[in-house]
Amino acid sequence: MKKNLLLSLTFLTFPFTSLYAQPEDINCIPENSIQQFSSEILGQLSPLKECPSEDDLILKKVSAEYKQFYGGLAQVSLDVKGFTLKGSSKELKLAIEMLGAKPPKDWKAAAAGCSTIQCAFEKLFNSKEAAMQVFNIYAKSGYNLSLDQSINQNKADQHWSAKEVREFDAAVTKMPKELRHLPHVGGIERQGDGLRGKGHGANVAAYASPFIQGYKKADLVVYDAGVTGKTTGKSPYDTTSWPQEVLIHEICHHHDFKGMYSSNYVAMTSEQKDSTFKNLSGWKEQTGKKGESIWVYSKNDSFVSWYAATSPAEDYAETCMNYVLHPEVLEKKVPAKYAYMKKQAFNGVEFKDKIWAKEQKLNWPKLNDLLADEAGCDSGLVECMKDLKYEYGSFSYPESKSGSMTMYSIGSAQTHIKNSSCFKNFKSDRAKKLEETLAEEADYCQQGGQRIIKNNSNKICQNTEALMGETLEDAAKVDVKQSIALCEAANDFTVDCVISKVPDALDVPKAFLPSVKVILQSKIPNRMSAMGNKLETIKTSEWLKSCLGAVSKISSFTSVDSKSGVAEKIFDYQSSSEAYSSGYLGRFVYEDSPSKDINLGCAKNMLSTFEEKGFKLPESGNPINLIKKPFSDEFKSFETEVLANISSATSKCLLKKCRVTKVSELLMEWEKKSPEKRSGLVEEDFVLELIEKSKGY
């Protein structure tokens, strides 16, 4: 008695509600899903042969049903929410019921100027098809799609779109008789997400609640989330979709509520004490930590979905919906519940042979063969991916340009391939060729050629796409350190050397090699920088001569450190080429003109020394990266011990021979400190060149 009283209070305070939640990330379906991508490709195509479109075929089907249900009925005139309209009395009364106490704001504009109910509804939905479907839905199921905006209070109208009406018409078409004309289910209402019920999170798609005798009508309400999920892009009458699942799930709740009505409102079928269905999973009601009632299962942890495992009511609704729309899935996952539904709910009728329940296999051998032929896909893909880079642990791809700036997107190789407008255009061209080839077949239209190509356009180059994505992802995982070490040991600083020594890295389809090399190359550090570290293996005298060969004049000035008060002589080097400017060798690169800095001229001259020593130079890279610590340390020593003393050492010399002798002595003293590295500078030509360049300080 106490439990029944609490249950009644619960109904009075919080209307009994069964929720249908979709996964949290249902609204995060990638923008470029297969269906959207297919539409994007085929949207660019101009039909080569005039065939009935999918919309035309559906309109023909809907018109035939409408004629079956309402054709030939006597026409009368009635006031429909302020407008006198003609139609069958059956339609007009249903229209009044659908429009309810608060018709949509655009009802007046839709009905104005119309003489028939079909005209007014066609304007209201902006669709001839939907104008008939809303009436067909009622004729087939006994449920109307409510247009009454009372539920939305003062918020924006939320009446059904033509696309939503089409999905729901497809859903009721699939409903077995056991789910039609259920007692107390009247209008299926559309409620804005801004008016969600208490406890209804953004992932709740819809809810149903039963008729409570004396004070509460039954509800079936759908939120935005219940109609904005993924659809297949194919005919909704041949396939299933999220909106269809939502509607049938909620109708299944009302099928469950029949047990409540027959038990004098004690419990719905799924929650009754002796319920066979409830016992399949051992559902038991317990009291939670906060005194709330919760359901737990104990006997069997097999459910058709994660949501089915939340309560007996959701278990029943999910099982029921899957029995109708996805019977093979249900039978495979939970055979005992499939057997229950077959025997107890649907009188032995099964739906495994229905077109929407079967995997849609393409039965057009010629198209299959054409889709399987991916010749040329690899070269097209490589061309489109030529700007793909691998940096900082991610793939980047140029998306757009703004002036001189290029905007890059970050993601996986597969994502960039899917999103590449270049490759979409490539696939679009191939789709056009499919149409050109297949349009010549006699039964092209009868088979729905354009629709079938559209629905299978995602298969164009699909194997090449997948293989390319995997290949590039694997290339990004390759460790190039060992290969770099092997090449450097052989004084080979080319990228080709490193790539050639990467184990199995090039064991890929030949056409993919350019793309693989780009990814591997992006993992290889700057080769000029690595060569800079090799300066210690070359005699200082050799590269120093090369570097100073880029200098036409050396001047100096004294700088006093503001903190220490120590004076330091700073040298400025003027370039021997107009291509380079003056600067401080080894100190820094002029940020405003790095391409003209004298350090670059020096570095380019130094490359000849590497070549003479048998080094294989990098294919690219800024030579200025040669100026590393080995260069800086040695050059600083040369400046301090040789250049800084030339002026004082030769100050008393009147003859050229004297100046040569004094500078030679400075060089010999510097050589003695590291003869194995510095020998070779004391040559008359070099000494004379140094004296000439040092004039003026």
Image (tube, grey):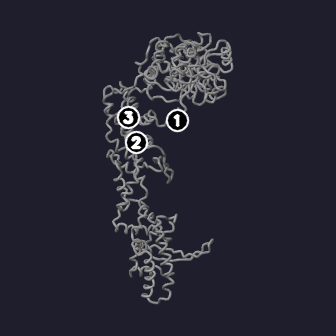
Q: Which residue is mark 1?
A: 28
Mark 2 or 3 closer to N-term? Answer: 3
Type of amino acid under label 2: Gly
Type of amino acid under label 3: Lys
Q: Quadrant of the N terminus?
A: top right
Q: CA distance from mark 1 to mark 2?
A: 22 Å
Residues at discs 2 and 3 in contact (Cβ within 8 Å)? no
Q: Is residue 372 visible?
A: yes
Q: Which quadrant holds residue 116?
A: top right
Residues at discs 1 and 3 in contact (Cβ within 8 Å)? no
Image-based side of 472 in relation to 203, left or right: left
Residue 354 vs residue 270, the one in the foreground: 270
Q: Position of residue 167 (x, y in %)?
A: 50, 24
Compared to 365, does 501 lie above or below? Answer: below
Compared to 443, does 501 lie above or below? Answer: below
Residue 353 vs residue 364, the one in the foreground: 353
Q: Which mark is residue 469?
A: 2
- Residue closest to the far bottom: 654
Q: Secondary structure at mark 1?
A: helix
Q: Position of residue 122 (x, y in %)?
A: 53, 23
Q: Secondary structure at mark 2?
A: helix
Local packing at callout 3 (Cα closer than 10 Å; few below 14, some 14-19, many 20+) is: some
Q: Secondary structure at mark 3?
A: helix
Q: Which residue is mark 3?
A: 459
Q: Is residue 549 visible?
A: no
Q: Position of residue 44 (x, y in %)?
A: 42, 37
Q: Which quadrant holds residue 38?
A: top left
